[in-house]
Amino acid sequence: MKIHEYRAKDLFRREGIPVPDGVIARTPDEAKQRAIELGGRVVIKAQVLAGGRGKAGGVKLAKNPDEARELADKILGMKIKGMTVVRVLVDKAVDIESEFYLGIVQDRTQQCSTLMVSAAGGMDIEQVAAETPEKIIKLPINPETGLRPFEAREAAFRICGGKTALRIADVMVKLWRAYAKADSTLAEINPLIVTPNQEVWAVDGKMNLDDNALYRQSEIAFWRDHLGEVPEEYEARVAGLSYVKLEGNVGCVVNGAGLAMATMDLVKYHGGEPANFLDIGGSSNPDKVVKALEIISRDQNVKAILFNIFGGITRCDDVARGIIKAKEKADIKLPVIVRLIGTNEDAARELLAETDLESAATMDEAVQKAIDLAKGATS
Amino acid sequence: MSIFINNDTRLVVQGITGRDGGFHTERMLSFGTKVVAGVTPGKGGLDVLGRPVFDTVEQAVEVKGANTSVIFVPAAVAADAILESVDAGIKTIVAITEGIPIRDMNRVMPVIRAENIRLIGPNCPGAISPGQAKVGILPGNIVTQGKVGLVSRSGTLTYEVVHKLTMAGLGQSTCIGIGGDPVIGTNFIDCLEAFEKDPDTEAVVLIGEIGGTDEEEAADFIKANMSKPVVSFIAGQTAPPGKTMGHAGAIISGGSGTAADKIEKLKSVGIPVAEIPSQIVPKLQEVYK
């Protein structure tokens, strides 16, 4: 789960990381008022859950409150990567002498959290990693001890010196605390600013949290921004389904994530376009199937629905009954192709033969039928 | 033979009194797995399907000589259950549980490595060695004894491929689902290494998916260390970047972990990669007769 910059900065403040004073504004007038309170010179920052906000024109420096109003007026309502800006963060501006990058991420290969530090702050860190990897210092963090102050100092003195290095090392340890307490998979300050009088400030903040740990992060879990989510994906998640919307016309209902991905790929391979990823999970609970059908059929692009179910321990005839019932309950008019394989598949096919549902024996046959039906419906 | 689980497997089921634990214990027993005990803290003394339930794994090891455990307990307490097994002296642990926090697994893994434990999963379907034992939730009716080893990050896609192998008369030595989480105990290389050593495995099918670089590392390993033929399939060629595709670990992040990269890498070291699942068996038959 991603959280907004202003939320991440709140978590940073709790650990004592120096963060410029800032407040949220939802209207241009509010932005002007906040700018007055913050001393006039502020940065207006779009709060959307997407990267590249600066490049999209969503981050601007205002020299005075009137300019803050003007800029907020432009940024509010702006669309960044498909998401509408409904709030801006108004941050007190700080003078910049140098910029650093501090990040902690989960390293999949090392199976631990890793501190990343660079003097190339303010840039796209993935680009830095790709082009000049020697500019990034990486340090694995022991999960039992956490990031220890001496480790942070060692890293800091490799990118700068003196009091500044000590201040940056202090921020690193505090960033680790914020990261660990929130069960994060990423916590990033880019850039960490050093001012001409050697103060350090986290002028940006980014945190991603582990979805599997939200059960013990009740406060933060509540911060999920549903506006940043595709509505159907939100609805599916609440219903216990895993759904990702795509642009094609063949709706897919599959049990298991790997098989669901393979089904999408197969639609593409045979010349069609998948409308979605959807994993209904191991069991084929009829209620979940109804919800899945409702969500998929609401997508106007969808012209045919393909079921691909591997009945391992669940019996295929039970799954077929569930699908037949669910199709009636969800009142689906679109053509439905069902491919069931595994235990009792013959009995399942007999059941389907008595309905208007198309059945198929193999994945390839099912996918081809679905593509043809989707095409037929369009032409 | 087989890898990781076999006729010597003496299994304890952690979470045997739960719905999934009980359901799958019955199926593991009917497959012929030597399930010797169950564990549910606070329910010691009960009997499930004729098997004694203990309060701790330690008791199950002491009284019934368990040497392998399978974990069906809820995600919030699963990391603790893994560590309990390690502490009791269990050397092979299969964690079925989905949804264990990454921070918990980060703390489990150093112990697993230090104690040289074979942890399969979490968030996996387990392993099955036809004719010997199954530990986990893989359907027992689709496998048949033979010489093909299979390793996969998926569940039902694994079943799909196993089913196709069986239909084509290609039996299996062991089929393993290593799990869909970002932090897992056993990776592709661990399985490939074991398959290479196993005298009863003659060829290997590797099923990967988007996210991470386990497939790329496996490709290098195969090139340097495998004499047995390997064929592969990678799921998620149409997956959009930045979205978690069902499995917590199946995500293309920062442009890395794409199916295209993995396929290219595997092909570059000479491993045949099936474009679609129905090509896996024919590709295997080309290199393994």
Image (cartoon, coloured by chain):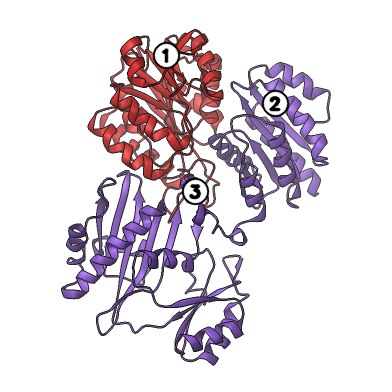
Residue linked to disc 1: B37
Q: Nearer the viewer, residue A163 or A319?
A: A163
The N terminus of chain B sits in image quarter: top left
Tell me the distance, in whole angstroms, between the alpha carbons under discs 3 and 1.
Answer: 33 Å
Q: Amino acid at mark 2?
A: Val
The C terminus of chain B sits in image quarter: top left
Could you tell me which secondary element the residue under label 2 belongs to?
helix
Q: Is residue A65 left or right of residue A187?
A: right
Tell me if label 3 and label 1 are in contact, CB under 8 Å.
no
Colour in which the image shows chain A: purple
Q: Amino acid at mark 3?
A: Leu
Residue linked to disc 2: A319
Q: Is residue B154 above or below residue A84?
A: above
Res A337 visible: yes
Chain depicted in red: B
Question: Could you classify mark 3 by the number of other residues whose Cα lies within 10 Å: few (under 14), some (14-19), or many (20 or more)?
Answer: some
> How many labels sit on residues?
3
Residue A157, which numbered label? none
Residue at the spot 32% in from the left edge and 71% down from the top edge: A121
The quarter of the picture where residue B68 lies is top left
For disc 1, the chain is B
Question: Could you classify mark 1 by the number of other residues whose Cα lies within 10 Å: few (under 14), some (14-19), or many (20 or more)?
Answer: many
Residue B224 percent across, percent down from the top left: 26, 33
Q: Nearer the viewer, residue A122 or A169?
A: A169
Residue at the spot 43% in from the left edge and 82% down from the top edge: A92
Residue linked to disc 3: A214
Tell me the distance, in whole angstroms, between the alpha carbons under discs 3 and 2.
Answer: 32 Å
Question: Mark 3 against mark 2, which lies toward the viewer?
Answer: 3
Tell me the distance, in whole angstroms, between the alpha carbons under discs 1 and 2.
Answer: 32 Å
